[in-house]
Image: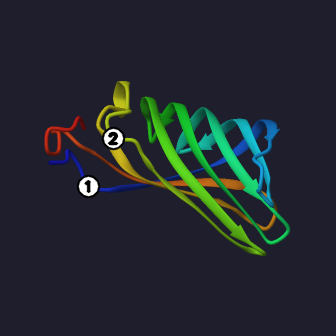
Amino acid sequence: MTSEAEEVIAADFDVTEWDPEPYEIEGSNSDLSRVRVTKLFDGLIIGTSRAELLMAGNSRGAGYVASEVFTGTVDGKEGSMIIQHWGLAEGEAAASAGHIIPGSGTGDLEGIVGKATYSQDASGQHSLELRVYFRTEPVNGLPG
């Protein structure tokens, strides 16, 4: 059961901190790194996030997986949530998407679930689009 229909909420963000830590695994032909990232959001999503990324890249492509903790407001609702997302690039083609971890919302964001899509335009501006709704009851015994 949901308390309302799916909402589409978008905002721009800036990466304010990028702290990579390279590592090696024998047999790999790609550059590997753990990266700590801080972002600042402005628009219908206002706040900051801290993310931990695992990245791999080579001359042909790159990819990452991340867990990101957001704190702030989403369309006027204040709290925090965790987004788990991934990205893949090959040449000019790129995709980046993920999901809000069910049960991770706090404050007014309690019960938030949905999808996240990250993008970057030709000028380099980063954006986040959330497609969310609020779950008021657990699914199969799992928390909302």
Q: Position of residue 90 (x, y in %)?
A: 73, 73
* Residue 60 picture quarter: bottom right
Residue nearest the observer in this picture, 72 or 85: 85
* Residue 39 picture quarter: top right
Q: Where is residue 64 in the image (x, y as percent from the top left)?
A: 65, 53
Quadrant, the C terminus: top left
Residue nearest the observer in this picture, 143 or 44: 143
Q: Which residue lies at the image location 54% right of the left edge and 51% below the top edge?
A: 85
* Residue 123 picture quarter: bottom right
Tag 2: residue type? Answer: Pro
- Is 143 left, or right, of 52 in this rendering? left
Mark 1 or 2: in front is: 2
Q: Which residue lies at the image location 64% right of the left edge and 36% below the top edge?
A: 52
- Is 46 left, or right, of 99 in this rendering? right
Tag 1: residue type? Answer: Ala
Q: Mark 1 points at which residue?
A: 5
Label whose residue precedes the other's in the sequence (1 or 2): 1
Residue nearest the observer in this picture, 123 or 99: 99
Q: Which residue lies at the image location 49% right of the left edge and 54% below the top edge?
A: 98
Q: Which disc is residue 90 wearing?
A: none
Q: Which residue lies furthest to the right in this view?
A: 59
Q: Which residue lies at the image location 45% right of the left edge and 42% below the top edge?
A: 75
- Is 86 left, or right, of 89 in this rendering? left
Circle 1: is it few (<14), some (14-19), or many (20+) Cα within 10 Å?
Answer: few
- Is 69 left, or right, of 123 in this rendering? left
Q: Which residue lies furthest to the front in this view?
A: 26
Q: Name the residue under label 2.
A: 102
| 39 shown above or below 98 | above
Question: SS of the residue at dot 2?
Answer: loop
Circle 2: is it few (<14), some (14-19), or many (20+) Cα within 10 Å?
Answer: many
